[in-house]
Image: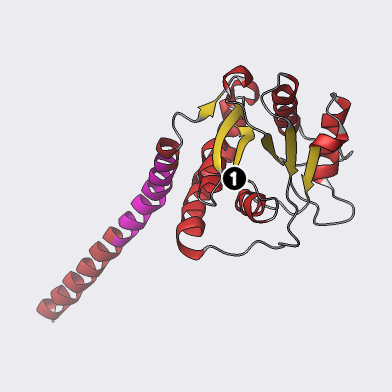
């Protein structure tokens, strides 16, 4: 009986060891895959990301990505930074038009109208601002920019932490893009940015899967609207 008990004990020990190795492998994958995806996207967009508007190459249009609204319907601070960067490019003659892409999924939530109004208040004529009401994600914004608005080149504008994914995704849809990054950690602090940085690493994995494997259609396409 002692011998039989020892065999059972060894069997469970081996099972426990394999489970531990499997869990360790899963843990490593959870850490390594997002880090690898982030490093890859960063490397692929290196050299085409700018932090000063004056350094951005001349282009016809800049895409400004949505970043949420406050309870009063005004742009969040991050979104305001993006819009201001777009307006700056327009004012110094680096671009001639702005494409605001964001969420208008409900009647009461119209992100792009708020973006348009903010840019207009800063001096951009309404005629030079185009709205993409169905830019529900970075993927959908880039997809629609090419398929719906006929873009082949653009400057994309967003915070530095999000900029590599925005450029990379757009380039996978045939847009020859460069990017202008707005400050994030410098303004909002590393501690406050940790949730965004963590979410961005996971989003990078999802972006690679979507653009190279599944290629899902966006929520809405609609008619062609050449800018």
Q: Quick one: quadrant of the C terminus?
A: top right
Compare residues 62 and 118 and report the one nearer the observer.
62
Q: Is residue 70 visible?
A: no
Q: Nearer the viewer, residue 12 or 116?
A: 116
Residue labelled with disc 1: 152
Q: Main secondary structure of the magenta part?
A: helix
Q: What is the residue that sits farthest to the left in this orientation?
A: 3
Q: Residue at x 49, y 31 (%)?
A: 48
Q: Is residue 49 above or below residue 195?
A: above
Give the residues drawn in magenta, as a range: 22-40
In the image, residue 128 lies at what x, y percent?
Answer: 81, 35
Residue 50 position, x and y percent, is 55, 25
Question: From the viewer's perspective, is residue 223 above or below residue 27?
Answer: below
Q: Is residue 77 magenta?
A: no
Is residue 140 at least partly visible in the picture?
yes
Q: Quadrant of residue 73?
A: top right
Q: Is residue 2 left or right of residue 142?
A: left
């Amino acid at each position: 009986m002692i011998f039989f008990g020892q065999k059972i004990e060894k069997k469970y020990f081996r099972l426990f060891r394999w489970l531990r190795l499997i869990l360790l492998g899963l843990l490593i994958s959870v850490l390594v895959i997002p880090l690898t995806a982030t490093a890859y996207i960063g490397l692929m967009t290196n050299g085409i990301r700018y932090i000063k508007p004056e350094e951005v190459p001349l282009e016809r249009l800049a895409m400004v990505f949505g970043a949420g609204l406050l309870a009063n319907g005004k742009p969040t601070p991050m979104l305001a930074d993006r819009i201001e960067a777009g307006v700056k490019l327009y004012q110094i003659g680096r671009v001639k038009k702005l494409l605001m892409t964001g969420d208008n999924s409900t009647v009461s939530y119209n992100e792009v109208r708020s973006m348009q109004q903010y840019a207009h208040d800063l001096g951009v004529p309404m005629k030079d601002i185009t709205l993409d009401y169905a830019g529900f994600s970075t993927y959908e914004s880039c997809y629609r920019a090419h398929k719906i608005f006929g873009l082949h080149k653009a400057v994309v504008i967003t915070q530095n932490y999000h900029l590599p994914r925005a450029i990379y995704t757009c380039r996978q849809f045939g847009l020859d893009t460069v990017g202008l990054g707005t400050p994030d950690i410098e303004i909002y602090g590393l501690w406050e940015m940790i949730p965004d940085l963590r979410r961005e690493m996971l989003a990078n994995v999802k972006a690679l899967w979507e653009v190279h494997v599944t290629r899902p259609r966006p929520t809405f396409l609609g008619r062609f609207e050449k800018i």
